[in-house]
Image (spheres, helix red, strand yellow):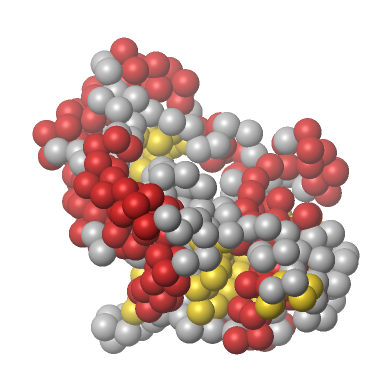
Amino acid sequence: MKYLDLKQINEPYVHAADEVLQSGWYLKGEATRRFESHYAEYIGTRHCIGCGNGLDALTLIFRAYMELGVMHEGDEVIVPANTYIASILAITENHLKPVLVEPDIHTLQIDDGLIEQAVTERTKALMIVHLYGRCAYTDRIGAICQRYGLKLIEDNAQAHGCRFVESVAMPSQQARTGSLGSAAGHSFYPGKNLGAFGDAGAVTTDDDQLAEVIRSLGNYGSSRRYVFDYVGRNSRMDEIQAAILDAKLRDLDAANQRRKEIAAIYLSQVKNPQIRIPHSDRDCVWHIFPVLCTHRDQLQQYLQDHDVETQIHYPIPPHRQKCYSSLLSVHSSLSVTEQIHAQELSIPCHQCMTNEEANRVADLLNAF
């Protein structure tokens, strides 16, 4: 059993690429404008700006805030310690300082009870990362940002279509991740819930001025042809990726619902005390179904021996990476993060799986 069968998932959308190839227009065309409009409407923001990839999306957000004078070199950005390294790369690329905060072991999201103590006079933003497809936002996070005047940046690379329920009493009032903060970066890497046929990304925001600067920065710093207001970069979504994403967007909610159905089998059936399965107290679109096991490597080999492919997200935390050795001296004790990175194993969970396949994986986990 493959961890993720992209060929099967993508086969219905090949026609979208063929249509672009036949059109003869491959950059900054109607397909990109159409997807940007549809995705902004889907997320619930005024603006969507396509770009080259998810890392560029986050990097451009911080760069735009610096161009606008909202942030300056050396300012601090709070970020979850257990995130994928791209979240932190976007911060340091702009000569900002990442401040790592531990996750909650039950949700695997940033622990909102630890954020406030990390705020200093240099803190200008909080980045939340909707890891594994689970909503990381809480009312407490919103209150902290309001209290200290922090920009709330969402890394929505893994949670396309996820929702935050604003009120238990009013469940119909639900906002999608990517619309909860000041701006959000989205990745459409092929393996994502909304995945392209290559690299692509986007920024969503309600901030008109920020959107204008981001669009210019991603187009060499140009807002109109041969006029350059900023020292920009080339980070644009091509027409093929935009057309594919627009076609897949129509099926995203159904695909996410199917992932939830597969996850529900795991949540209800896996009872092995050696294996910790995620809490399901927040909306999750299950980009990744992570389990924690102290014998993670043996569990992975056991599943492989039974023809079940798995992945590890991620074996080495950012503060233990050579490129960020400076973080280790500041954050010498991140025990929850290190536990997650030492124990996490991702099991198959996607829309093309059958119930029988999910039941088989659950049986194998229980028998381990």
Farthest residue in the top direction? Answer: 305
Residue under the image location 63 percent in, 34 percent down: 316
Place of residue 89 in the rendered image (x, y in percent of width and height, measured from the top left): 71, 51
Residue under the image location 14 percent in, 38 percent down: 354
Q: Does 205 sit left or right of 1 as displayed? A: right
Viewer-proximal residue among 133 and 276 = 133
Residue under the image location 79 percent in, 38 percent down: 323
Question: In the rendered image, which quarter is residue 171 located in?
Answer: bottom left
Q: Is residue 13 visible?
A: no
Place of residue 305 in the rendered image (x, y in percent of width and height, measured from the top left): 31, 13
Q: Does 24 sit left or right of 28 as displayed? A: left
Question: In the rendered image, which quarter is residue 250 located in?
Answer: bottom left
Q: Does 108 sit left or right of 303 as displayed? A: right
The C terminus - image quarter: top left
Viewer-proximal residue among 123 and 252 = 252
Place of residue 152 in the rendered image (x, y in percent of width and height, measured from the top left): 62, 74
Relative to 34, does residue 312 appear above or below in the rendering? above
Q: Is residue 277 visible?
A: yes
Place of residue 48 in the rendered image (x, y in percent of width and height, measured from the top left): 50, 73
Viewer-proximal residue among 159 and 236 = 236
Q: Does 40 sit left or right of 358 as displayed? A: right
The N terminus - image quarter: top left
